[in-house]
Image (cartoon, helix red, strand yellow):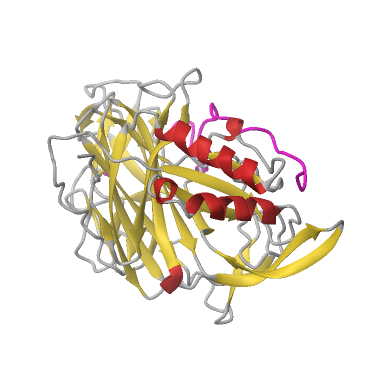
């Protein structure tokens, strides 16, 4: 972790900134996001400021969360007390509990990395904010072709739980192939195959996406409560898959998504924009999918074991949407008013372990010091899926009204872009 070292030139620091395995518990949609924050003093040292306003909530707002590490591109910081801007009495800290001072409320750096900050005011402390610095220009999302419209094209996200040692999975694979060979369903849906069943799968992903550990399993828009496995035959399973796509495609689409991505070596920067059709709270996630991976697949056949060579497509290699350990509905964007937009930047660096062999990806398993050797993603065969999720009821998310379902999804090439899609 890089720590910010900034000279003070102002008196106040201001920042913006048949099935294999057991089924896990269903998605706990009401869970709050996991947040790890450094220990903060109960009462940070703050000068006596009897004339300063009092309040209940301190926020740090960033105009950018990702900047280029060129010493020029800057993130500007603002402090809010109960929603009102304040410029005095605030102390800024980094994640090592060191005070940080800024020049003109701007943060710049020449070092690639992640910088964590929080603020204190009287007895209040803010949540952490994170700035990421990258060696790639942050892209600009495409121009909106219909600024006044909110009639968006709609795609649903199908999540397949699978693994190459799952002997029952070939029936689900064949059923999906049958459905996606039809233009009606391939144009309405995106398939994401999560290889979570066995850890020695060459495309194993160590993410606790709902349904992990139980395979085959399929569900739509991360609505795990409506999941199913193999049925009596390929034909019946395919009919059920098609029916689920039809069912979820009829739901009112509450947002459109535009995306621009750039690649520099093995670093990918994705800027996504969500445009609301209704006023509600939104989350956003991005997954990296890879096609064309050929390796053995286990299957039960004629009462015995069998292996055959399968071309594995739609393999989820990165799932950047974690809320809690079993909730992958995306990073919070807050409430977006109908017709308005909100942007989010994703940064993926596949060279975080530079000692990994060229043809393998030594991926850390959970919090342990052990690494799993699996196939490194071939970015030439990868694409990006970005999705937006919403509460089941419009408005802000609460325990009774959690962010619970994906409302729309789009696919974007690496080094490509996709505009907001509108219906004619």
Q: Nearer the viewer, residue 154 or 221?
A: 154
Magenta part mainly helix, strand or loop? loop
Camera sees residue 184: yes
Q: Quadrant for residue 204, please give it.
A: bottom right
Left/right of residue 166 with respect to residue 76 in the rendered view:
right
Q: Is residue 101 above or below residue 232?
A: below
Q: Is residue 30 magenta?
A: yes
- The image shows residue 109 at horizontal and vertical percentages of 29, 64
Magenta residues, start to end: 16-44
- The image shows residue 159 at horizontal and vertical percentages of 54, 46
Q: Is residue 80 above or below residue 21?
A: above
Q: Nearer the viewer, residue 8 or 134?
A: 134
Q: Quadrant for residue 155, please give it.
A: top left
Left/right of residue 389 with respect to residue 341 in the rendered view:
right
- The image shows residue 38 at horizontal and vertical percentages of 51, 44
Query: Residue at 24% across / 22% down in the picture?
Result: 53
Task: Tell me the quadrant of the picture where the C terminus can be found.
Answer: top left
Q: Is residue 11 above or below residue 173?
A: above
Which residue occupies the extreme right position in the image? 303
Query: Residue at 68% across / 34% down in the picture?
Result: 25
Left/right of residue 330 with respect to residue 272 in the rendered view:
right
Camera sees residue 324: no
Query: Residue at 24% across / 69% down in the picture?
Result: 70
């Amino acid at each position: 972790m890089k720590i910010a070292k900034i000279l003070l030139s102002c008196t106040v620091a201001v920042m913006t900134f048949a099935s294999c395995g057991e089924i896990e518990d269903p998605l706990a949609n009401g869970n709050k996001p996991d947040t790890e924050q450094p220990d903060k003093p109960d009462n940070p040292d703050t000068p006596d400021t009897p004339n300063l306003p009092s309040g209940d909530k301190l926020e740090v707002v960033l105009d950018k969360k990702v900047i280029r590490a060129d010493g020029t591109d800057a993130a500007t910081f603002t402090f809010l007390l109960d929603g009102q801007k304040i410029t005095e009495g605030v102390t800024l800290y980094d994640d090592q509990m060191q005070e940080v001072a800024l020049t003109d409320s701007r943060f710049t750096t020449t070092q690639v990395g992640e910088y964590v900050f929080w603020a204190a005011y009287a007895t209040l402390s803010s949540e952490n904010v994170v700035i990421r610095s990258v060696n790639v220009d942050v892209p600009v999302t495409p121009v909106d072709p219909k600024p006044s419209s909110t009639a968006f094209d709609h795609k649903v996200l199908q999540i397949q739980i699978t693994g190459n040692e799952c002997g029952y999975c070939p029936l689900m694979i064949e059923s999906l192939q049958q459905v996606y060979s039809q233009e009606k369903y391939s144009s309405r849906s995106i398939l994401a195959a999560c290889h979570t069943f066995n850890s020695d799968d060459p495309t194993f992903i160590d993410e606790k996406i709902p349904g992990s550990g139980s395979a085959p399993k399929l569900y739509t828009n991360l609505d795990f409560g409506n999941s199913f496995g193999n049925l009596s035959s390929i034909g019946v399973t395919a009919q059920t898959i098609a029916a689920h796509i039809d069912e979820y495609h009829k739901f009112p689409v509450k947002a459109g998504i535009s995306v621009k991505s750039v690649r520099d070596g093995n670093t990918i920067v994705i800027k996504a924009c969500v445009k609301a059709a209704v006023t509600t709270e939104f989350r956003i996630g991005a997954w990296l999918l890879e096609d064309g991976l050929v390796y053995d697949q286990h299957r039960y056949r004629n009462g015995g074991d069998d292996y055959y060579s399968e071309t594995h497509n739609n393999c989820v290699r990165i799932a950047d949407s974690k809320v809690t350990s079993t909730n992958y509905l995306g990073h919070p964007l807050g409430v977006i008013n109908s017709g308005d937009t909100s942007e989010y930047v994703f940064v993926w660096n596949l060279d975080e372990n530079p000692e990994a062999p060229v043809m393998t990806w030594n991926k850390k398993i959970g919090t342990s010091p052990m690494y799993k050797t699996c196939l490194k993603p071939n970015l030439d065969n990868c694409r990006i899926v970005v999705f937006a999720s919403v509460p089941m009821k419009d408005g802000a998310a609460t325990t009774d009204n959690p962010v619970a379902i994906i409302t729309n999804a789009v696919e974007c090439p690496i080094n490509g872009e996709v505009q907001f899609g509108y219906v004619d």
